Amino acid sequence: MRRLAAQLTAFILVLAAAPLPAQRAGRQHLVYWAGTPQAVEVFRIFGREPGPTVMIMGGIQGDEPGGFLSADLYADVSLKRGNLIVLPRANFKSITSFSRGTEGDMNRKFRDDLGDDHDRDAVTLIKSLIRESDLFLNLHDGSGYYRPTYESELANPNRYGQSVIADAESYLHEPTGRVIPLAHYAQEVIDRVNREIDEPLQFFHFFNTRTGADDSPYKEQRRSASYYALTQAGIPAFGIETSKQLPSLELKVHHHNLAVNAFLDLFGVEMDRTSLTLPPPRLSHVIVAVGEHPPVAVADGQTLLAAPGETITVVEVAANYDRGLSVAVDDLGNWNDLGRPLRLERPAAITIRKDQTVIGRIRLEPLSEAGPPRLRPPLPWRSVRAGEPAVLAEAELVRPAGGEGDAASVGGSLSAPGRITGFVVDVDGRRAEVAAGGVLAVPAGALVTMADLKVEGGGLPDGVVMNLRGFVPKEKMIHNDGEDRGVPADTGRDLMPAFSLDGRGVDYAINAEQGKTILASATLSLVKPRLLSVTIVVNGAARVLPIGSRTVLPEGAAFTVTEIKLAEDLVLSRPVYTLGGRALPPALPLSLTVPSFAANLAVFNGETLAGKVTLAPL
């Protein structure tokens, strides 16, 4: 151990003495292949004092958001000492499609000649950045929980999650004669990180893949970026893997941050600002250029009408994030059409994403005649709040395919020529109304029941059902007639994401259907409750505990939970509270005592976890 410590000290002294860029404190934002869908952003942050250069990379595999979202946060830090090279989205195309690699696994392309491989230029860039660095960190999300010995199906040597991975215990880089004590570095970081984690299942472990050994079961890692960094660039390189089974994306990012921060501290890179947060992405609007006309700002849900044949270009996305934004014009464009001119010949939809998450949609429609572009306004809506119904402003009718705009034009027997203007839905026993074409947002986990259809100008056409797409009552599993009125649906477990409008289990269609014809439609949008803070009162003093925080109180001390605050001012529709896994009464205030062990005070809406705080005895 004494020898390893001496090696560590000597290696850090070598790093500190290495030549650094002649650059004052600040940052550079470099965009490679700008103006193309393959654009790659690189951020260089320079400290006020010289020190090692650490490269942080995320998103080389696009279905691991904890890694690339954590890396993205470091593009905004400022440094007192040392330097960072941050490549948040090494494979942006795969991120937008939420796939491991649309052109194959990019992290297996660092050894061979790539020829005309689609990823060749990006891999060449990553190699050049690695060679400028003193430490390389590759951020991933892995399955389960890595353990050196078998503990369970989810915790065993064949899992990757919650591990710091290196290709050897130590490595001699022959060109420099430098011995790199990888296991020593990793264990030092793991010891620091695990002190900040409450759940033993979530502890990090060192995973030595022994990549270069003849009997290594992980020989494919010889083509990875970390193996290139270790063997060719001669620098310490690690994969940091959080578990895909962690209960929230925020927790994955938090654990990545803990590990990255520990590595930075170990290698002498000092940040000025360490508050790394991850607010939910929100779209403000997109700026669309239409031919020679002035650009138009289009909000989520709006329709842009323009003359047929006009050139349409989305030139800017205004959101609460500057990076990770893409625009896909369905049926007309590519996977990323931001800044790409397209000709409008037929109706199309534009989907706006923050990484893999859809944050907005607008529509493009040709005008029936030439004229300046104009907007059709969005459909107004507001979320369900506890204690009040959600009533949406009436919006225009969704017309049946092939019809002329009213229910009387639909084939079949009609009892009266009325038109369907909206839907009535019970949300946890409260009445809510949503207009045809509108959106009804409810807390994920709420019980919703299709109640009735709103009809104007006559009676309801014969044979019309009210169908919540993606929900099939158990008694109708064999013969489903599509009629869902009167049957409660638990939005936390009864809906099928494959039938959702977004394919991700967030937005579901509420349809008025007559046979195969949709007479009217609205959207049921599930908003996941997200805990912001818990307010407790101890000895007459109120304390606000942020989500994920750890609070130490005297064992056995009495305290009262007085307030649960959720993001977006949501209120729990079906509150469930637990302390150390023990169910508590579902109403506030809660009078409790501090347990004899560290325990989580968890907040649920039905079966959906909103967040938790930790209480530990003094």
Image (cartoon, rainbow, N blue to C red):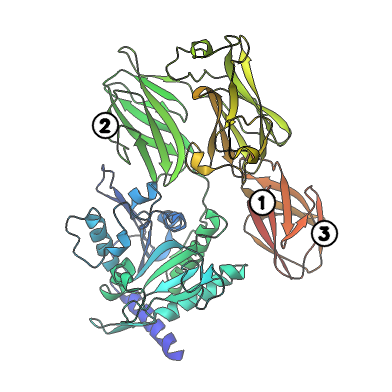
Residue sitting at x 42%, y 36%: 318
> Residue pushed farthest bottom?
2
Can residue 226 be seen?
Answer: yes
Residue sitting at x 17%, y 55%: 116
Instruction: Say if 569 sits above or below 293 in the image.
Output: below
Q: In this view, does 236 lie to the left or right of 145?
A: left
Looking at the rendered structure, which numbered label has been put on residue 539?
3
Looking at the rendered structure, which numbered label has been put on residue 104?
none
Check disc 2 and report its element: helix, strand or loop: loop
Check disc 1 and report its element: helix, strand or loop: strand
Alpha carbons under labels 1 and 3: distance apart: 19 Å
Can residue 132 be seen?
Answer: no
Give the amino acid type for the residue marked by disc 3 in the picture: Asn
Residue sitting at x 42%, y 72%: 165
> Mark 3 or mark 2, which is nearer the start of the sequence?
2
Image quarter of residue 343: top left
Tag nearer the camera, 2 or 1: 2
Give the amino acid type for the residue marked by disc 2 in the picture: Pro
Q: In this view, does 113 lie to the left or right of 618?
A: left
In which quadrant is the C terminus drawn?
Answer: bottom right
Give the amino acid type for the residue marked by disc 1 in the picture: Ser
Q: In this view, does 40 lie to the left or right of 433?
A: left
Taking depth in this image into account, of 91 and 177 the one nearest to the observer is 91
Q: How crowded is mark 1: few (under 14 residues within 10 Å), some or many (20 or more)?
A: many
Which residue is labeled 2 in the image? 341
Tag nearer the camera, 2 or 3: 2
Q: Do the residues labelled 2 and 1 touch (CB within 8 Å)?
A: no
